[in-house]
Amino acid sequence: MYNRTNPAVIKSILLRLTRNELLQEVQFMCSQIDELEASNRRNMFINLQYFALNHLPFAKTTKYKL
């Protein structure tokens, strides 16, 4: 998802995730931040992680269909 997708679209996807899914994505972002050297891509992961962590308290707990 992170290779060819615009960060704004990634944020939209992150908003739809449940709390557990969001935590998994945050862990993935942390691993990418640790692996990457200073670059625009690393900055993108830092910004997305910050966004995801701020949204975490508001994330839904389960998936359900209307």
Image (cartoon, rainbow, N blue to C red):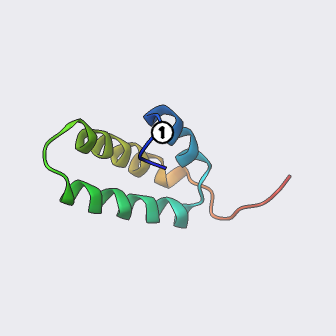
Residue type, numbered disc 1: Thr
Q: Is residue 59 left or right of residue 34?
A: right
**Residue behind mark 1:** 5
Residue located 35% across and 49% down the image: 49
Q: Is residue 11 left or right of residue 51?
A: right
Looking at the image, which is closer to me, 53 or 6?
Answer: 6
Looking at the image, which is closer to me, 32 or 46?
Answer: 32
* Image location (x, y in percent) of residue 3: 41, 46
* Image location (x, y in percent) of residue 23: 45, 63
* Image location (x, y in percent) of residue 54: 41, 46
* Image location (x, y in percent) of residue 15: 57, 45
The quarter holding residue 7 reads top left
Q: Secondary structure at mark 1?
A: loop
Residue located 14% across and 49% down the image: 37
In the image, farthest residue toward the left: 38
Looking at the image, which is closer to me, 41 or 27?
Answer: 41
